[in-house]
Amino acid sequence: MHLVSLIYASKITDKIHEDGVVDIVQKARISNEKLDVTGLLCFDNSFFLQCLEGSREAVNKLYAKISSDPRHANAILLQYEEISKRQFAKWGMGLALPTKSNSVSFLKYSRRAQFNPFEMSGESAKQLLLALAKKSEIQ
Ligand SMILES: Cc1cc2nc3c(=O)[nH]c(=O)nc-3n(C[C@H](O)[C@H](O)[C@H](O)COP(=O)(O)O)c2cc1C
């Protein structure tokens, strides 16, 4: 099996309110577990940054589905690579919300005064997700 990691960024649309994100993640956990997909979703009130990891087939199919979801738009693939081990094995889908401490990390890895994953390199996006995963503020 080829284990892969995919990272994309997108922007929230008016199709959901902020509390809809928790609902997305609760459902995602159930279906990701069935597909043996793990990952982390980072949300800062306007942008999403998500890593999906699992088999190449599962991750590709899931990304195709997620990227056409009307609750967000302009999904842009930031990084796709084969990996030898999972970085987010603990979570069917972890959720990093804009708590004070997480927001410090969002900005640390952004090139601007405001968090904007569309301007991040794939590598910075990955480093941000890894830094968030090390903290305890993942729901
Ligand atoms: C930002 C965002 C992240 C999502 N992440 C996942 C995910 O990790 N796993 C998942 O199954 N669905 C995820 N979804 C929901 C999917 O787009 C889709 O609604 C869901 O898989 C149900 O699809 P179905 O009704 O065809 O089964 C996400 C949606 C959004 C907007």
Image: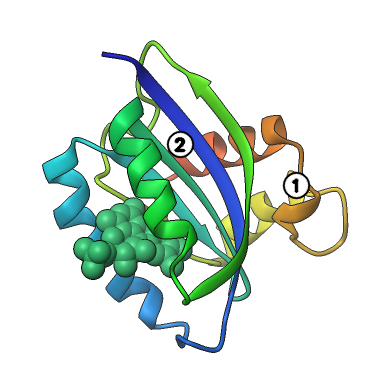
Image spot of residue 80 (x, y percent): 55, 29
Tag 2: amino acid: Lys
Image spot of residue 99 (x, y percent): 53, 66
Q: Residues within 10 Å of mark 1 (few under 14, many from 20)?
A: some
Answer left or right for 118 relative to 22: right
Q: Residue at x 55, y 67 (%)?
A: 98
Considering only vertical position in the picture, is 55 above or below 52? above
Q: Secondary structure at mark 1?
A: helix
Image spot of residue 18 (x, y percent): 47, 82
Considering only vertical position in the picture, is 82 above or below 26? above
Q: Taking the image as drawn, is residue 108 in sight?
A: yes
Find disc 2 in the rendering and name its residue: 134
Given the current orientation, which residue lies at the most extreme right position?
A: 112
Q: Which quadrant holds the N terminus?
A: top left
Confirm or deny contact between disc 1 and disc 2 (CB under 8 A): no
Find disc 1 in the rendering and name its residue: 108
Q: Residue at x 56, y 37 (%)?
A: 131
Q: Secondary structure at mark 2?
A: helix
Tag 1: amino acid: Lys
Q: Taking the image as drawn, is residue 26 in sight?
A: no
Q: Residues within 10 Å of mark 2 (few under 14, many from 20)?
A: few
Q: Residue at x 53, y 22 (%)?
A: 81
Q: CA distance from mark 1 to mark 2?
A: 15 Å
Answer left or right for 75 relative to 56: right
Q: Earlier in the sequence, mark 1 or mark 2?
A: 1
